Amino acid sequence: MDSIQTTVSGFSLDLGPLKEPIGFIRVLEWVFTIFAFATTGGYSGTSHFTVKCPGEENTHDVKPVFGYPFRMSAYPYEMPSCDVSAANRTFLQGDFSSSAEFFVCVGVFGFLYCTATLILYLGYQHVYRQTTRGPFIDLVVTAAFAFLWLVSSSAWGKGLTDVKWATNPDHLVENCTYCHAGEFPSMGRLNASVIFGFLNLILWAGNCWFIYKETSFHKDPNAPATMEEGGAPGP
């Protein structure tokens, strides 16, 4: 209990780290991480094609709806039939949830880590730098996130390509004699999510260098004392 009170009472807000690369890049990571998982997790789109049966004047609009996590079999749509009176319930094909959910998971945990480290940088800078453990752990976790961004962004980029194929109106009407492809679903947000993913890769990988400079690996702990520090003069 006393240690918790000591830690809380040791909070001292200092915006100085935001002027340094280690703090400024962390803020950029925080922002771009939000953009990455928000553009993916909140997506919902609609494909479109039409059905014109022989002998009928009216054209039937079919609009299959889909969205995150892109488990396509969960999105049924009614397909008009020209042979029988009842419409057929049809499903989009494919399951691309694994890559999408992995990408969003990396984004959410990256956001939480950025938030925690920003609090540490701005409020507990003395705790962060008083031992070599803080910068070292920060370096390892940041490097791990850089690797996760590489893997998840690559996987989601491939998954997005498959989502586009599964929802392409030209593909949906391939086996339909009386169907005509309509508007392609808007994928701008999903394209942006992949871009944000690779931007995060660049930011997190680049930030490793600035965090490395805070560790004892970059700072020589056995450096000789200077004249100003009262050390003995060299030979």
Image (cartoon, rainbow, N blue to C red):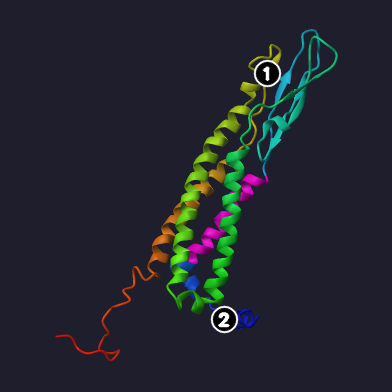
Residue at 67 percent of width and 24 percent of height: 182
> CA–CA distance between discs 2 and 1?
65 Å
Instruction: Check disc 1 and give the amino acid type.
Output: His
Where 72 falls versus 34 (above or below)? above
Residue of label 1: 180
Q: Earlier in the sequence, mark 2 or mark 1?
A: 2
Q: Nearer the viewer, mark 2 or mark 1?
A: 2
Residue at 68 percent of width and 14 percent of height: 176
Residue range in magenta is 24-42
219 part of magenta stretch: no
Q: Which mark is residue 16?
A: none
Q: Which mark is residue 12?
A: 2
* Secondary structure of residue under mark 1: strand
Whole-percent x and y of residue 152? Answer: 52, 45
Residue at 45 percent of width and 70 percent of height: 133
Q: Nearer the viewer, residue 65 or 207?
A: 207
Q: Residue furthest front?
A: 1
Instruction: Check disc 2 and give the amino acid type.
Output: Ser
Where 127 falls versus 84 (above or below)? below
Q: Nearer the viewer, residue 188 or 167?
A: 167
Q: Residue furthest bottom?
A: 230
Q: Residues within 10 Å of mark 2 (few under 14, many from 20)?
A: few
Disc 2, disc 1: CB below 8 Å? no
Question: On the picture, is 162 further left or further right than 76?
Answer: left
Q: Residues within 10 Å of mark 1 (few under 14, many from 20)?
A: some
